[in-house]
Image (tube, rainbow, N blue to C red):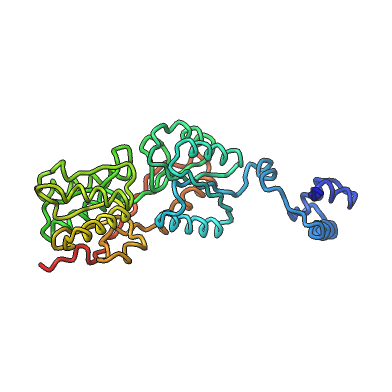
Amino acid sequence: MKKEVTTLKKIAQLLDISTSTVSRALNNHPDISEETTNKVKKIAKKLNYMPNIFAKGFRLHRTNIIGVIVPNVLSYFTSSILKEILLQAEIKGYRVIISESNNDVDKEKEMLNTMLQFGVDGILMSLTKHTIDVEPILYALNQKPLILFDKVSNKVPCSQVIIDGEAAAFNAVEHLINIGKKRIAILKEFEQSYNSEKRFQGYLRALKTYKIPVDEKLILSTDDISLKKGRRLTSQLITLKEKPDAIFSITDAAAIGAIQTLKKFNFKIPEDIAVIGFSNSLSSTIVEPQLTTIDQPGKRIGKIAVDCLIEEIEKPKEHLTSKTIEIKTNLIIRNSTLVSL
């Protein structure tokens, strides 16, 4: 048997008052007497009345709901961002709907449309690594405040919260150079990845700064910079006649894959080949030797992203300007690069 849903109309009929009076009483409107307000709230509680936040949102043009779209909720870095988004949104009186695109551009577009249909007040979004067509995002941006974080695009004219990936990569490669490494390989994604390209530019700038020639054989790209691909790409590197003496990976996962392959073939880490990752994931401290890596401040990114979005939601559009906020990172030095000089 279908359970009957308690509505404002039903409460109004039971108390012989108008639906608008019930609505105003539940919202503590000053025009409604204390006696009527108490009666309405008492029967609403008795009947387990639950307001339809979406219907209310459409009437008031506000739902106090933020939509969040990310490629992968299980990523350690992404989960640290999401946890802070949830915390900060709750503090400021907003609910959060989280969707996962699984790096699928069609699903990303579908999730955007769903967020708009739900009537969210604003959207926080981290793009898939395959996102090239930004028209769906531009459409959503015209409807609601939208901020990109972590995986972004310079083709979308909105506020963006990112780490300074180029500077982070420069610092990582500079560290390798400072410990005496000269043949430094990089494991990265194909050129369409915004974050990968920023890190690649930092790698190139470090080599140029220290007058180390670029060797194309040491630049390896893949579509999925994972543990498995880290193993495979490192297997390619160690077959070179002139082997690398260091590997910089744009993810911790691939860096750990590199360490596993190097250990399998009895290379000493870091004496023969040093390894640096990117993210400071939990796995970076479990692997042996522990992984030198770039620490990405996920909590800070989450807080700033929420603050920026709520500012755009609550302030008139004409008083806002789009901005890119680059957050500094730290290099965490561990045993995978600790060489006795």
Side (left or right) of 156 relative to 46? left
Task: Give residue 101's position: percent from left, percent from top.
Answer: 48, 43
Foreground pick, 7 / 190 = 190
The residue at the point 63 percent across, 41 percent down is 61
Task: Give residue 275's position: percent from left, percent from top.
Answer: 22, 58
Question: Which residue is outermost to the front?
Answer: 265
Task: Give residue 291's position: percent from left, percent from top.
Answer: 27, 62
User: Which quadrant of the figure contains the C terminus?
Assistant: bottom left
Side (left or right) of 37 relative to 57? right
Residue 102 position by quadrant: top left
Foreground pick, 105 / 260 = 260
Side (left or right) of 131 relative to 260? right
The residue at the point 48 percent across, 39 percent down is 108
Question: Which residue is outermost to the bottom?
Answer: 340
Task: Give residue 106's position: percent from left, percent from top.
Answer: 48, 35
Q: How many marks?
A: 0
The residue at the point 90 percent across, 49 percent down is 16
Side (left or right) of 88 relative to 242? right
